[in-house]
Amino acid sequence: MKKRLLTIAGALLLAGSLPVASFAASTKQFSDVPSTKHFAEAVYDLADRNIIGGYPDGTFKPGNPITRGQAAAIIAKMTNLDMDNVKNPGFKDVTTSNGSYKAIAALSENGIISGYGDGKFGPNDPIKRGQMASILVKAFDLPRESVTNNPFTDIDNSLSHRENILAIYALGITTGTTPTTFSPNAPITRGQAAKMLKATEEAKPSMLTLKASDLKWTSVRVGQTDTGNGVFKVFKVNGKEGYTEDKIQLVPLKEGTGLLNLLGTPIKGSNVKDYKKYNVHVKKVNGELQLTLEETEEMAATEVKLYGHQGKVKTIALSTMEGKQLSDQVPFKEEEFSTVSITIDQPGQYIATLKLEDGKEVRYGIEAQAKKEQTYYDITVLKEEPSAVYKEIAEYKGKYKLSANSADIAEITFDADTNTFHIKATGKKEGTIYVDYEQRLTEKSCDDTECYFSAWSGLIVGVKQMGSIVNVFVKRDAEIDH
């Protein structure tokens, strides 16, 4: 068993952790930002931290639109991006003499902005609400949680900022301009921007982000994962080729344990596995949720559903396929539609015997196969039914022929008095038998609205085996009825 621990505790886990907001009385005052304004607290907080500033005349001008260059400068400072060692982003309209050049370059280098399609960035253009949503989500690495009910009629699937708008809406960072509109193309004022930025700091949860490159992969996706009944949330963020990379976001929600399974494409020559499996532990330490990833190669206990027993289950016994008794009182959970579930925590073949309250017993073969890249076993279930009976309609004349090698698979007899086939598996081998009639049969059935027609000219008999468990099924060999 190989295990490795990775612990994420509170703000220490955040890549590019955010500065803690100060709520002390502001030492700066703007003549046009009275304390009664809804954005006042945000404006003064950011001003005290030298993230935003006012004008020489002592005003802040909260109603003025904020430009894309100004927004870039503020966000780069808030997220502590390195602006000393930047690469030229290559925007036609952003020269090194631009006051926001380093901020724009840093955001571009970190995959937060990409500019317009014509090679320009538009640093003096007013930033729009949709654009701001996307920059906030990427710059602060917000969880990509969306909403199932999109309330905004002006945000449809064709809008490039849709996912990010719904992400900040889900976090409560901002609402729409009305209950049903977001107005993605409306400009944002300086006062609105300050409030939105501070709200983003406060709304971002403690979380862990795993980039594909952190795992020495070129891509990453989520495989078989169990969030432990709400212990954590997991989000996949798709990268943009040549610009950003895939990443996985983990947000702890409450104490408990869950499972995380990641699959990826290893970097060429890295000699690493193409999967990662973790036990995800969330505990509260010093009042904050602590998330620990415990890498493991173990398989998780896997649910097995047993169905079709037609009766209330009293007990379930479990043995190996070879007959070794493992338990005569296996814990089980009753579900709908004559189904019960048990769990299997080791690979192999088993026999589960259901003892019903009416005294009958029903047996199932269970096979649990381990695949190293998966969290759970691949489960195959086979109900023991070594024989089957099929009654044909009155129009059938009783003539038929069987496909080759049928004698090794099942014994098939026909009772002409009752128009009934009796099928019994030989136990020698599994396979499929085709019973071909010398006539074509049709049937009509109607409900309150329309009638349906079916046609068939024989039967399909299937025999499956799992160790000593044999299952026989029979169905019509249906054809299209013209």
Image (spheres, rainbow, N blue to C red):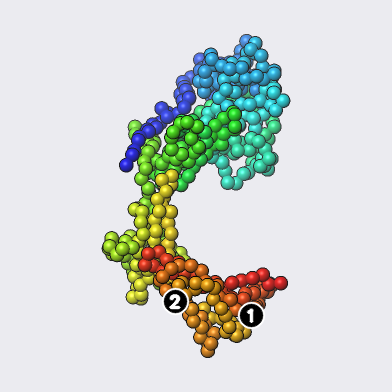
| Between 254 and 329, the one nearer to me in the picture | 329
In the rendered image of this protein, does residue 155 appear above or below residue 69? below
Instruction: Give how far across and how far down residue 422 sits, in percent.
Output: 48, 80
Three-letter code for the amino acid on which mark 2 is drawn? Lys
- View extreme (bottom): residue: 417
What secondary structure is found at the residue carrying circle 2? strand
| Between 482 and 194, the one nearer to me in the picture | 482
Label 1, on which residue? 439
Q: Residues within 10 Å of mark 2 (few under 14, many from 20)?
A: some
Q: Quadrant of the C terminus?
A: bottom right
Label 2, on which residue? 424
What secondary structure is found at the residue carrying circle 1? strand
Three-letter code for the amino acid on which mark 1 is drawn? Gln
User: Can I make out residue 332 in this image?
Assistant: yes
Residue drawn at x 40%, y 53% as measured from the top left: 369
Quick one: label 1 or label 2, which is nearer the N terminus? 2
